[in-house]
């Protein structure tokens, strides 16, 4: 399990679907803006509506992987929006689990869809369901308060 509590929270890694689907990009942007009230968010680009175009220009998956893993390892907490299934987000969560990071997974239930048992069944993850941005903000605030 995790040791200690979050201290001097300044580094946050936000994970959300990029190549798996960008339907929630505006929601990601709003979540990131709220997370910024708690510290530095390394992955602000996840909430950028023009990200796909810029990432395609770089055409360098190794660069993206290495940059993001460095940010992930340097973070104090990980907040992942897991409603849109994404191989990348799952990978990031797995690596964060290995590093014993504090991890909050946010899930918006949808009819006919179920959250992966690999996320929902992992006791190292805090998984919270929500329906609105206001709920997400309260969940984040409580998560950070409870681990500070």
Image (cartoon, helix red, strand yellow):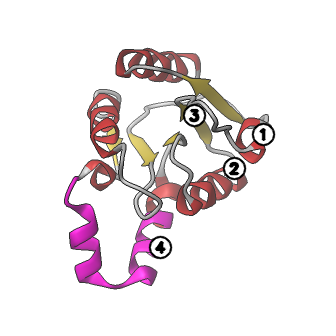
Q: Is residue 57 magenta?
A: yes
User: Could you tell me which secondary element the residue under label 3 belongs to?
Assistant: strand
Residue under numbered circle 3: 104
Residue under numbered circle 4: 65
User: Could you tell me which secondary element the residue under label 2 belongs to?
Assistant: helix
Image quadrant containing the N terminus = top right
Query: Which residue does the image show at 46% across and 20% down from the upper left?
Result: 131
Q: Is residue 62 left or right of residue 56?
A: right
Whether 43 is drawn above or below 117: the answer is: below
Identify which residue, 104 or 116, lies in the foreground.
Answer: 116
- Of badges 1 and 2, the one in the foreground is 1
- Could you give the CA–CA distance between mark 2 and mark 4, rounded to whole angstroms? 17 Å
Q: Earlier in the sequence, mark 2 or mark 3?
A: 2
- Could you give the CA–CA distance between mark 4 and mark 1, rounded to whole angstroms? 24 Å
- Magenta residues? 49-69
- Work out whether residue 78 can be spotted: no
Q: Quadrant of residue 26?
A: top left
User: Could you tell me which secondary element the residue under label 4 belongs to?
Assistant: helix
């Amino acid at each position: 399990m995790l040791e200690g509590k979050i201290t001097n929270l300044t580094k946050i890694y936000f994970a959300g679907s990029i190549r798996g689907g960008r339907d929630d990009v505006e929601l990601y942007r709003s979540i990131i803006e709220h997370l910024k009230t708690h510290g530095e968010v390394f992955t602000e680009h996840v909430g950028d509506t023009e990200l796909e175009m810029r990432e395609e220009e770089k055409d360098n998956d190794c660069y993206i992987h290495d940059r993001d893993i460095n940010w992930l390892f340097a973070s104090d907490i990980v907040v992942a929006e897991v409603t849109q299934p994404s191989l990348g987000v799952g990978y990031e969560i797995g690596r964060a689990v290995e590093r014993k990071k504090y991890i909050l997974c946010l899930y918006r239930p949808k009819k006919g869809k179920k959250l992966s048992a690999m996320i929902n069944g992992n006791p190292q993850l805090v998984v919270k369901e929500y329906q609105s941005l206001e709920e997400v903000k309260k969940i984040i605030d409580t998560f950070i308060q409870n681990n500070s």
